[in-house]
């Protein structure tokens, strides 16, 4: 019987080539989409799980609650880690990492070569024991014990020392001479932070680091260190967490309110750190995207399975005689169910083979979109073969169970009398499946359009400054700081350069929080930035009250602040000019507000504009960026001129630039990635739906061939025939829109709530998606309708 079943299945595939091709193509594309998204989701969920102690490692997060606002910060004071380890025996190790956000790249000197690296971390000695960063050379226990020691990765070892053994050799981090005591394997891509150099924490005592460490190592109010704890096997993180506030109150000798410490599991960091301040990395994602992409994978697969169910049940009359004959000769219903389920599973296996070919072809595109590095080699394929086979069995059974049950119910007497189930003509279940299929497609279309509109809004919104035509030069050397005025004058000699300014940070970069006491208000950390006289005009900001910093007022250097409108509102000032601001961070500077700048977005549109304070850079004070406003269409020629001017002052320092607008656009990298991925998979979902609809329309037109011939003989026009064949599908699309619109509105409204500044979901988005659905139906059904309507009536009457 198995041989007979196999022959029958092959004959049906040959006899119904078009419908078999539609089923296989739909299932293949659906499975390929699902496999690709599963690879992405698996990769996202695998972050930091390779660490041997991953289940016992926690990161300390600071939670500050004030007037209904909750702020999460990934950093903590330096003294916290050793104090916790000394106080609580359940803590096996406490590890601090120092990676200051205001230093974009570190100068690394190897002999006469200079490099600038951004993945440089200072770490406590137990770091290599707590985390699974295996050393190829060196001892994990001792590598970071001594001051002025460094562990580098394989990649950096090749970069700095070529093929020679780097162990024991020296390199300069800034101007601190450090000895290479270990070579670590390259950090895996599924790590929430990646280092190239790991410098011993005690090296921070070197004189070259005192200019930015200050008293941070002993100051409980300086929150600039990432703190990780390794707990004992039997220890409870929740119980330990409850002890933190009483512990802090004893340490600080003050009653704490509105502040607590939270132990974040290591495995949660990558996907559960959305909107945390001062994150250790910029590559963290969001668990919401995992849910969204998983839903898309499921939707695409459901659409493919619906196609199979619809075509199988629609063409059931073609196999009625086979079912009747088998029942007459003794086949039971169970045997028929097994036969049809077997055919479904076999078709799924065939589709799976094609899907794997599609996956291997499109995998590079997925890697490019997601910034990942997925591979499916022979070893990987073997390891997931069991999972794929199991999935094919389950999906084959799921897609084939209804057709199998449906076909096995045919009564042999009705079949032989030519009186096959009248209920077949109603096909209510098939209509429901078409509605579900198109409702899913419409939801995906609306979602993709909403993401696109929000991104367009983010790109084009007035940010409170002019982000266009601003070239930014990162400053890596102290010489540039001391000779800035000369460099500025040199640059301004080019007529295309309108203005040049220096600053400690920029919108879109990490902005420092500093403690301020506004007049008539209370002390609180506020965002602030050091700038010079030309910063506001260079960025095209608007002064709405008072004036800008001016060289004509000598007191501006030491005794002046400019605040934004949000600060004026929060501080409760009617007029800001003349008010006093006290900052304890610089010799107790008690300055006067001289101006108010129009609110500007210094973070992404996910966050509301918060109070912001600008104050002057002192002569010789370090800064991180030079902003150059240009006015030219021949940008490349001007950049060459700027490079030459730079190299006159910094002949040994590589010339680096970026454009302010491009840097701001990177704030929405995850949304852009989501738009691309969802757009592609939405297109594929629509493609699969079109395939199924085309096959279903072809079959229904085929079933009504004689009816259409009679109608044409009796005078029916071609247009009326097309409307007759299309109107049922049109009704189904209307129902699909009615179902899809509220679901899509709810889903996208929830997604948009992540933005403090967002679009409103307009009716036009839903109408456009509905129109697109109608166009898809007309395209899919129209061809077959026109073909049938234009057929010669005589041929139609001879049919059957």
Image (cartoon, rainbow, N blue to C red):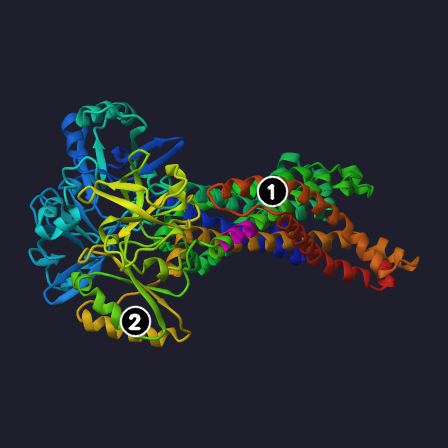
Q: Nearer the viewer, residue 243 or 466?
A: 466
Left or right placement of residue 56 versus residue 170 in this view: right
Q: Residue at image x 39%, y 76%?
A: 634
Label disc, if present, on residue 505 of the rendered structure: none
**Which residue is tagged 2?**
492
Q: Residues within 10 Å of mark 2 (few under 14, many from 20)?
A: some
Q: Quadrant of the N terminus?
A: top right
Is residue 358 depicted above or below 309 in this figure? below
Residue 172, position in %: x, y? Answer: 11, 58
Query: For the magenta stretch, what is the residue range?
Result: 448-456
Q: Quadrant of the C terminus?
A: bottom right
| Magenta segment, prevailing SS (helix, strand or loop) | helix
Residue 303, position in %: x, y? Answer: 59, 47
Q: Earlier in the sequence, mark 1 or mark 2?
A: 1
Residue 431 location, quadrant: top right
Q: Nearer the viewer, residue 309 or 592?
A: 592
Q: Residue at image x 9%, y 46%?
A: 205
Q: Tell me, yes or no, whether the highlighted magenta stretch contains residue 450.
A: yes
Residue 558, position in %: x, y? Answer: 22, 50
Which type of secondary structure does the marked residue at label 1 adopt?
Answer: helix
Q: Residue furthest right?
A: 714
Residue 734, position in %: x, y? Answer: 71, 45
Q: Residues within 10 Å of mark 1 (few under 14, many from 20)?
A: many
**Is any part of residue 49 visible from this angle?**
no
Which type of secondary structure does the marked residue at label 2 adopt?
Answer: loop
Left or right placement of residue 238 versus residue 413 in this view: left
**Is any part of residue 723 visible from this angle?**
yes
**Which residue is tagged 1?**
400
| Closer to viewer: mark 1 or mark 2 | 2
């Amino acid at each position: 019987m198995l041989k007979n079943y196999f022959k029958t299945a092959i004959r049906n595939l040959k006899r119904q080539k078009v419908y078999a091709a539609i089923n296989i193509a739909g299932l293949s594309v659906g499975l390929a989409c699902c496999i690709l998204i599963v690879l992405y989701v698996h990769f996202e969920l695998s972050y930091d799980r390779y660490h041997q102690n991953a289940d016992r490692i926690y990161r300390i997060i600071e939670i500050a609650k004030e007037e209904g606002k909750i702020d999460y910060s990934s950093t903590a004071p330096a003294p916290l880690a050793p104090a916790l380890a000394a106080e609580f025996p359940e803590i096996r190790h406490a590890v601090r990492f120092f990676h200051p956000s205001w230093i974009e790249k570190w100068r690394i000197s190897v002999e006469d070569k200079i490099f600038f690296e951004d993945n440089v971390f200072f770490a406590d000695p137990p770091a290599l024991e707590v985390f699974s960063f295996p050393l190829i050379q060196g001892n994990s226990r001792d590598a970071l014990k001594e001051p002025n020691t460094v562990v580098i990765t394989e990649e950096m070892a090749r970069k700095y020392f070529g093929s020679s053994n780097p162990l024991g050799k020296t390199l300069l981090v800034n101007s601190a001479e450090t000895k290479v005591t270990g070579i670590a394997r390259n950090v895996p891509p599924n790590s929430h932070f990646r280092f190239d150099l790991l410098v011993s924490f005690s090296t921070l005592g070197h004189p070259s680091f005192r200019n930015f460490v200050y008293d941070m190592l002993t100051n409980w109010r300086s929150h600039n260190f990432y703190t990780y704890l390794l707990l004992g096997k039997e220890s409870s993180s929740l119980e330990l967490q409850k002890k933190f506030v009483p512990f802090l109150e004893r340490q600080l000798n003050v009653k704490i309110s509105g502040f607590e410490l939270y132990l974040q599991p290591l495995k949660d960091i990558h996907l559960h750190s959305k909107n945390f301040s001062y994150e250790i990395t910029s590559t963290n994602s969001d668990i919401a995207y995992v849910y969204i992409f998983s839903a898309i994978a499921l939707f695409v697969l459901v659409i493919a399975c619906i196609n199979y169910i619809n075509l199988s049940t629609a063409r059931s009359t073609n196999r009625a005689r086979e079912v009747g004959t088998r029942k007459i000769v003794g086949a039971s219903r169970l045997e028929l169910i097994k036969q049809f389920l077997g055919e479904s599973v076999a078709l799924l296996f065939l589709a799976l083979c094609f899907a794997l070919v599609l996956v291997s072809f499109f995998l590079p595109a997925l890697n490019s979109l997601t910034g990942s590095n997925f591979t499916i080699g022979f070893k990987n394929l073997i390891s997931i073969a069991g999972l794929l086979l199991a999935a094919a069995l389950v999906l084959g059974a799921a897609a084939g169970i209804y057709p199998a049950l449906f076909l096995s119910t045919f009564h042999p007497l009705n079949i032989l009398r030519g009186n096959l189930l009248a209920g077949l003509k109603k096909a209510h279940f098939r209509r429901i499946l078409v509605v579900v299929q198109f409702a899913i497609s419409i939801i995906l279309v609306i979602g993709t359009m909403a993401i696109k509109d929000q991104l367009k809004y983010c790109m084009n919104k007035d940010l409170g400054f002019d982000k266009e035509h601003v070239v930014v030069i990162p400053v890596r050397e102290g010489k540039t700081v001391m000779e800035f005025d000369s460099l500025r004058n040199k640059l301004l000699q080019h007529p295309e350069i309108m203005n040049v300014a220096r600053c400690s940070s920029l919108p879109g970069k990490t902005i420092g929080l500093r403690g301020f006491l506004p007049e008539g208000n209370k002390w609180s950390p506020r965002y602030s930035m050091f700038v010079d006289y030309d910063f506001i005009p260079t960025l095209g900001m608007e002064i709405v009250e008072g004036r800008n910093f001016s060289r004509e007022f000598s007191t501006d250097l030491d005794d002046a602040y400019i605040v934004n409108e949000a600060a004026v509102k929060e501080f409760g000032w009617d007029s800001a000019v003349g008010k006093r601001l006290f900052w304890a961070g610089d010799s107790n500077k008690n300055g006067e507000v001289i101006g108010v700048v129009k609110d500007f977005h210094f973070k992404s549109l996910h966050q509301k504009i918060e109070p912001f304070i600008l104050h002057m850079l002192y002569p010789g004070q370090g800064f991180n960026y030079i902003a150059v406003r240009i006015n030219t269409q021949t940008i490349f020629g001007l950049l060459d001129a700027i490079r030459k001017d730079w190299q006159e002052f910094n002949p040994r320092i590589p010339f680096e630039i970026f454009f302010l607008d491009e840097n701001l656009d990177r704030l929405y990298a995850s949304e852009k990635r989501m738009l691309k991925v969802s757009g592609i998979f939405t297109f594929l979902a629509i493609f699969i739906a079109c395939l199924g609809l085309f096959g279903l329309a072809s079959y229904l037109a085929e079933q009504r061939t004689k009816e259409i011939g009679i109608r044409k003989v009796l005078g029916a026009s071609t247009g009326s025939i097309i409307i007759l064949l299309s109107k049922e599908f049109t009704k189904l699309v209307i129902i699909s829109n009615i179902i899809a619109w509220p679901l899509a509105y709810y889903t996208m409204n929830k997604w948009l709530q992540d933005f403090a500044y967002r679009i409103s979901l307009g009716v036009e988005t839903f109408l456009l998606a509905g129109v697109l659905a109608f166009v898809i139906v007309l395209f899919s059904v129209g061809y077959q309708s026109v073909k049938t309507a234009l057929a010669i009536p005589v041929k139609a009457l001879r049919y059957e």
